[in-house]
């Protein structure tokens, strides 16, 4: 998913939470020395844009839902496998078309009303009913579901039309809403779902939202009636800063205890007096080449050899050094290494070799013309690169690419647009992907490869596609992996697809960025994750946080 | 709103204008503040023009570590891309000045034309044009600049146009007032009686009289334009492919220069903007004063100070 | 009566300006590229029906003219529409933002008025002395600094001593009244100071020249010739007359400051109206932008009107 505004959307609606390798900060998560109480104060430069799951865009909004709403399942502390949340047991039957979840007994919403399997069934059925309207945000999560039933308070039965491959991945992201609150907001064909401010928020997670001021603060209090292990702290809070300088200054002044996403430049100074953790992340920057076979202008960019030459003209090490200050790695595949087994280590980043790139282009007969710029099919090889202004890393990245591309006779010109306008320019005209040539952006991958593999399918035109890539053979492999329940076989297929994509190059992958967070030394028990201590992966990440 | 309210105290238009050929040069020679302002601008312009030759490094090339400290080879240190700050400042001046001059040119053309037309033709034309000017005065221009720059996309050209079309009101009003008073003069009346055309009268008689004030106005508008560009860049709406001083500040700010301790990446560019604006204010203010005999007692007048976009108002809101 | 005529004229102009503003604001946003519809339509997996429904919900399926009439009708009822970004009434969003902005701006302006007026008067009165030189230089220096940069310099100077972001320490749980007030005071200090310092430069320069002009008037010269004491001249003649432009200026500036605090709000993470405008731009939240623009324009028009009327009261000659 695309950073920030798009990023969030996806985490919320498409696939499983991010995960990577994880380590427990400060050794044991909670020893006998663990103190209870206190408020853990987190700072961020991101935003909770809405408390309504049918409206929210930003990652932090989805992280909020993780801690205040019941989910059927979650990841474990190592972010490796699924463990119990509201559901304690689950099993598939009927050839994978029926899934039965056993949920906890005697659970309560924060307003004292009982929380049962009925709430879960109601949420699923409501999302299905209004998938094309008010509940569009959640449409991806309930794909292929026919209906959900709650035969009793502790049993949830979900019926699918086709046996899907990633049921748990989807439910890990599916917030269960209180029926007694939300059923009042389904008017206007479900469009009222979007109008509900959802403040004060009635939830059932380990924390309840006690105070919320947009763009300013979200304060969470321990929920005394939580159905599972209760957190050690009295609460935690998220303060939203409008710039990173203020964020880092606040940490230094001990106004906050932790930062979600430490700016690379500040890492060195913070290391002196804070615990700084860098975890291999799942956010990768990419160089997009319009691969729509129907594009009219600059058709030479569809030539795989031209794409290969470009790939060799990119100094990835320099990008990692300057843009990410060493907190990252050169990238080569659409699936980042942090996803573990799904990543194909054979798909390596291309060598930085300008001579080779020049040779490839020479062989194609694209001679250098005036100003050392090559001429292809009668026009100069001079292209516009669209960069989204709200992904700041793209500026410095472009500054590194431009002079190297000039050396291989290709002129790049930057066209910066805010992400809305940038995406419009990419899909123009009318979602046909005909006009743009190149772009720089980034994707935040999920642990299950399905989502990342889906963004280059033909079906994603006007959806998540930002490369115009559309290839029948690839699409066939994509649906095949979706319906392959045998995970070893699916892995082999996923590896093959990565190799296929590298050859076709809708993207040239640039760098994998580390997720870096800093925590005051007076706090321990944090669980590392690519999303930091406050995430939409697992409730467990903040359950053992404690003062030292 | 009403002209009188916007110009509290004595109103320029009521004053007869002395002969003013060479008044700009006279002012610089006579007033130390004007000389200082002119001196500052001269140095900055020279540096900017000669940047390709005198800048020690390429402003696009990484020559050291990210946020490298000041040293003998890099007296002002390095920025967040490992680029020499001194070279960046020289090149940054160039773009900032280009924006300043170009935007001012746009506003001069618009404001000058409207002011001339309103003052010269008077009557209904005057009325309509002044109502339009009044409307432009109450538009909150900083938010509007942000909207337009964001919608059009951040490019140097767009920034110049946006700033230009929001800054012309002061020029229009100043010019209109002057033209009105010039028009009533004996020699102009005589020229008209002799059958000289509008164009001829404007070019031969009106413009030369208005020119010095136009120069003062220009210098002050340049300051506002540079300031606006810095503000837009700071909000992420600057042209990312051009290094302006505003962009240099924004780059450092975006990458947490302050909390990293890299003060050298953020203090000098802002100080340089301040110095340029100071130079413009001193020079422009002094010329305006010299043209306004009522203010002979003062070095600087209220009217010479264009209120700045901090408060989002049009430059002649005072 | 001439006076009444004048007041009525001013009022009519204010009303007309607001109407024009409403119209232009509407046109500006609806005719802009990167339209609201394409943005709204970017709901993943949205079917054409969904898009249509969304358009209907926001009234985007009607003709531009119908939308305009609808907009005016809603406006008459004080309804500014629903924010695209968070589906809340724009009025609510704006109210919150304004409530946040006003105290900070107010404090900064008061600081600037008091200090600027005093310095300006002293500078004028002590014309030609070192005092004047010093105060002029100070004022000009602050006047010339980019606002956001001045804010950043204060951050460098005070980081660690004073909070540099946000409106209050929201993590204080049930603070005592004094702790709470102290905390609020600490947070508002730096943003207000930044605003205050920049305005201070401006006000000083303006007050000084207003004073100088007054001091050059015949009646002041006469008073001097009559041998009146300097303080008496200052108090009885000069000050009173200089007050006229000062009052007007302050009223005028108030209208613009709210809009202009955007840079300061960005530096200090202040969740006010300026930031609301900026965020709305980034999210292409047209109803929110339209509303914010309307509020900002109205505030400018309103304070202009106040300035006009004040001026009229203080100096009825204006009507001629």
Image (cartoon, coloured by chain):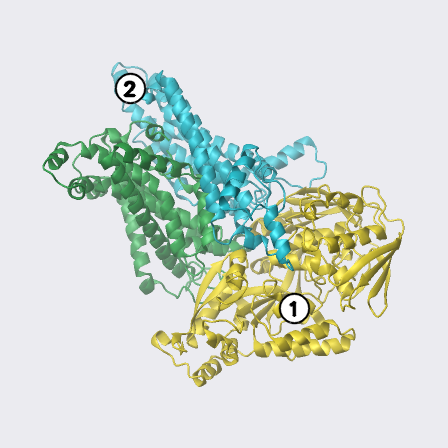
Chain colours: A yellow, B green, C cyan
Say the numbered circle drawn on residue A454. 1
Vertical relation: A306 (above or below) B61: below
| Chain letter for the residue marked with disc 1 in the picture | A
As helix, strand or loop, the secondary structure at mark 1 comes to: helix
The residue wearing badge 2 is C220
Depth check, front residue: C219 or C28? C28
Vertical relation: C65 (above or below) A533: above
- Total numbered circles: 2
The picture places residue A356, in percent across and down from the top left corner, at 48, 83
- Left or right of A520, for residue B178: left
| Chain letter for the residue marked with disc 2 in the picture | C
- Left or right of A243, for residue A194: right
Q: Give the residue displayed 51% in from the left and 57% down from the top.
A: A421
The picture places residue C38, in percent across and down from the top left corner, at 55, 55
The picture places residue C264, in percent across and down from the top left corner, at 51, 43
CA gap between label 2 and label 1 equals 82 Å
- Left or right of A10, for residue B64: left
Vertical relation: B172 (above or below) A358: above
Depth check, front residue: C4 or A258? C4
Say the numbered circle drawn on residue C227. none
Can residue C150 be spotted in the picture?
A: no
Which callout, 2 or 1, points to the residue nearer the camera? 1
Mark 2 neighbour class, 10 Å CA radius: few under 14, some 14 to 19, many 20 or more:
some
Residue C173 figure quarter:
top right
């Amino acid at each position: 998913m695309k950073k920030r505004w798009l990023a969030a959307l996806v985490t919320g609606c498409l696939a499983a939470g991010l995960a990577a390798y994880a380590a427990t900060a400060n050794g044991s998560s909670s020893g006998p020395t663990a103190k209870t109480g206190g408020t853990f104060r987190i700072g961020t430069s991101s935003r909770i844009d809405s408390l309504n799951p049918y409206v929210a865009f930003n990652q932090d909004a989805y992280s909020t839902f993780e801690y205040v709403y019941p989910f059927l399942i979650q990841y474990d502390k190592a972010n490796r496998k699924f463990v119990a949340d509201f559901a304690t047991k689950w099993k598939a039957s009927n050839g994978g078309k029926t899934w039965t979840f056993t949920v906890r007994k005697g659970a309560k919403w924060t307003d004292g009303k009982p929380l049962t399997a009925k709430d879960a069934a109601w949420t699923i059925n409501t999302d299905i009913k209004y998938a094309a309207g008010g509940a569009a945000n959640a449409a991806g999560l309930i794909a292929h579901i026919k209906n959900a039933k709650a035969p009793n308070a502790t049993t949830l039965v979900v019926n699918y039309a086709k046996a899907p491959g990633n049921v748990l991945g989807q439910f890990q992201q599916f917030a269960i809403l209180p029926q007694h609150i939300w059923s009042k907001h389904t008017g206007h064909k479900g469009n009222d779902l979007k109008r509900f401010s959802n403040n004060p928020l009635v939830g059932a997670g380990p924390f309840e939202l006690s105070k919320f001021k947009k763009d300013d603060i979200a304060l969470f209090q321990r929920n005394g009636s939580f159905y599972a292990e209760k957190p050690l702290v009295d609460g935690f809070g998220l303060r939203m800063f409008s710039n990173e300088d203020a964020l880092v200054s606040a940490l230094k002044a001990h106004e906050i205890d932790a930062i979600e996403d430490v700016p690379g430049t500040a890492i060195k100074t913070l290391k002196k007096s804070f615990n700084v953790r860098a975890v291999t992340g799942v956010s990768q920057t990419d160089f997009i080449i319009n691969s729509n076979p129907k594009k009219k202008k600059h058709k030479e960019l569809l030539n795989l050899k031209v794409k290969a030459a470009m790939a060799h003209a990119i100094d990835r090490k320099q990008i990692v050094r300057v843009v990410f200050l060493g907190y990252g790695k050169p990238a080569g595949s659409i699936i980042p290494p942090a996803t573990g087994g799904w990543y194909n280590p054979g798909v390596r980043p291309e060598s930085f070799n300008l001579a080779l790139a020049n040779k490839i282009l020479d062989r194609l007969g694209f001679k250098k013309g005036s100003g050392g710029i090559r001429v292809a099919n009668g026009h100069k090889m001079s292209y516009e690169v669209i960069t989204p202004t709200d992904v700041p890393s793209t500026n410095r990245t472009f500054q590194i690419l431009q002079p190297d591309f000039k050396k291989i006779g290709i002129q790049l010109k930057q066209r910066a647009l805010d992400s809305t306008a940038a995406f419009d320019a990419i899909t123009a005209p009318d979602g046909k992907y005909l006009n743009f040539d190149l772009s720089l952006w980034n994707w935040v991958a999920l642990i299950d490869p399905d989502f990342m593999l889906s963004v280059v399918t033909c079906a994603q035109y006007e959806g998540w596609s930002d490369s115009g890539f559309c290839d029948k053979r690839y699409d066939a492999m994509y649906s095949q992996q979706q319906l392959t329940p045998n995970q070893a076989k699916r892995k082999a297929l996923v590896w093959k697809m990565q190799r296929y994509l590298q050859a076709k190059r809708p993207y040239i992958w640039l760098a994998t960025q580390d997720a870096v967070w800093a925590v005051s030394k007076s706090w321990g028990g944090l669980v590392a994750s690519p999303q930091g201590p406050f995430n939409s992966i697992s409730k467990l990440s903040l359950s053992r946080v404690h003062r030292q | 709103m009403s002209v009188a309210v916007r110009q509290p105290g004595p109103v320029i238009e009521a004053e007869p204008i002395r002969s003013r050929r060479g008044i700009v040069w006279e002012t610089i020679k006579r007033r130390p503040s004007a000389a200082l302002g002119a001196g500052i601008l001269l140095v900055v312009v020279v540096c900017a023009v000669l940047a390709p030759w005198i800048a020690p490094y390429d402003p696009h090339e990484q020559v050291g570590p990210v946020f490298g400290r000041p040293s003998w080879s890099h007296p002002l240190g390095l920025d967040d891309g490992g680029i020499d700050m001194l070279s960046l400042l020289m090149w940054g001046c160039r773009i900032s000045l280009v924006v300043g001059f170009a935007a001012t040119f746009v506003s001069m053309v618009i404001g000058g034309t409207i002011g001339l037309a309103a003052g010269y033709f008077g009557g209904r034309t005057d009325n309509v044009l002044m109502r339009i000017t009044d409307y432009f005065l109450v538009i909150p221009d900083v938010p509007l600049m942000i909207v337009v720059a964001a919608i059009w996309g951040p490019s140097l050209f767009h920034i110049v146009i946006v700033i230009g079309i929001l800054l012309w009101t002061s020029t229009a009003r100043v010019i209109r007032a002057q033209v009105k008073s010039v028009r009533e003069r004996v020699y102009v009346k005589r020229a008209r009686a002799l059958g000289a055309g509008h164009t001829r009268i404007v070019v031969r008689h009106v413009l030369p009289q208005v020119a010095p004030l136009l120069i003062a106005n220009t210098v002050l508008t340049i300051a506002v334009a540079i300031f606006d560009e810095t503000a837009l860049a700071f909000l992420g709406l600057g042209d990312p492919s051009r290094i302006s001083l505003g962009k240099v500040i924004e780059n450092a700010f975006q990458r947490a220069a302050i909390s990293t301790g890299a003060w050298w990446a953020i203090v000098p560019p802002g100080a340089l903007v301040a110095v340029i604006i100071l130079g413009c204010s001193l020079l422009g203010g002094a010329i305006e004063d010299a043209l306004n005999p009522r203010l002979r007692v003062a070095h600087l007048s209220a009217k010479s100070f264009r209120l700045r976009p901090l408060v989002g108002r049009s430059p002649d809101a005072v | 009566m001439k006076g009444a005529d004048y007041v009525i004229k001013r009022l009519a102009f204010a009303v007309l300006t607001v109407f024009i503003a409403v119209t232009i604001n509407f046109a500006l946003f609806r005719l802009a590229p990167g339209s609201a519809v394409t943005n709204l339509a970017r709901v993943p997996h949205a079917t054409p029906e969904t898009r249509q429904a969304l358009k209907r919900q926001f009234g985007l399926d009607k003709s531009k003219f119908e939308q305009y009439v609808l907009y005016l009708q809603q406006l008459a009822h004080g309804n500014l529409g629903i924010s695209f970004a968070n589906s809340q009434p724009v009025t609510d969003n704006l109210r919150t933002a304004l409530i946040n902005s006003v105290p900070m701006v107010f404090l900064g302006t008061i600081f600037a008025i008091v200090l600027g007026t005093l310095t300006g008067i002293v500078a004028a009165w002590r014309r030609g002395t070192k005092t004047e030189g010093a105060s002029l230089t100070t004022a000009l220096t602050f006047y010339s600094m980019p606002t956001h940069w001045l804010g950043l310099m204060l951050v460098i100077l005070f980081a660690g001593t004073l909070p540099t972001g946000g409106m209050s320490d929201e993590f204080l749980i049930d603070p005592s009244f004094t702790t709470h007030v102290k905390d609020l005071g600490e947070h508002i200090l730096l943003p207000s100071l930044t605003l205050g310092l920049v305005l201070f430069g401006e006000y000083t320069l303006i007050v000084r020249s207003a004073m100088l002009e007054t001091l050059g008037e015949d009646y002041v010269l006469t008073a001097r010739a009559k041998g009146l004491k300097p303080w008496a001249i200052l108090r009885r003649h000069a000050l009173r007359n200089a007050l006229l432009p000062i009052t007007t200026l302050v009223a005028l500036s108030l209208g613009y400051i709210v809009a202009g605090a955007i840079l300061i709000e960005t530096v200090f993470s202040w969740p006010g109206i300026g930031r609301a405008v900026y965020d709305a731009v980034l999210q292409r939240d047209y109803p929110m932008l339209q509303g914010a623009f309307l509020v900002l324009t109205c505030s400018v028009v309103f304070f202009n009107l106040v300035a006009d009327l004040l001026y009229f009261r203080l100096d009825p000659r204006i009507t001629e």
